[in-house]
Image: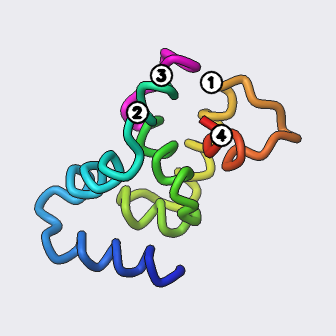
Amino acid sequence: MNNSTRTLLKSIEKRSVNLWDDFNNRFLSQNEGFYQRLLEKVPDLSSADLKICALIKLNFSGKEMAYLLGISLGSVHVARHRLRKKMDIRREINLSTYINSI
């Protein structure tokens, strides 16, 4: 876990009443229009899919995603696989690179 990620998680943990909302507000302030561009490309993404995309865009590891979302590492892998399927991304295309290009 790099320092900026650790700092972000610690700042969110202090007020963990609504962990995701706090994280999402910070994310949106730095990545304006990301969700709109993503939904233009893949309109049927769920809110859970959007969360995973946001975390991938910030280069969070699987373990960091699992911690923030309160799910297991296996569930993160399944979510990434399903996201790939919904986005119709072939195996040879890196999911992180694809999402960062949006």
Q: Secondary structure at mark 2?
A: loop
**Above/below status of 12 relative to 86:** below
Q: Which residue is mark 4?
A: 101
| Residue 45 sits inside the magenta stretch | yes
Q: In the picture, residue 47 is in which quadrant?
A: top left
**Above/below status of 92 relative to 40:** below
Q: Earlier in the sequence, mark 4 or mark 2?
A: 2
Q: Earlier in the sequence, mark 4 or mark 1?
A: 1
Q: Which mark is residue 39?
A: 3
Q: Which mark is residue 86?
A: 1
The residues colored magenta run: 39-48
Name the residue located 53 percent from the left edge and 80 percent from the top edge: 1
Direction right: furthest residue: 92
**CB contact under 8 Å: marks 4 and 2:** no
**CB contact under 8 Å: marks 2 and 1:** no
Which is more toward the observer, 55 or 62?
Answer: 55
**Above/below status of 83 relative to 51:** above
**CB contact under 8 Å: marks 3 and 4:** no
Q: Secondary structure at mark 3?
A: helix
- Mark 2 or mark 1, whichever is nearer to me: 2
Q: Residues within 10 Å of mark 2 (few under 14, many from 20)?
A: few
Q: CA distance from mark 2 to mark 3?
A: 10 Å
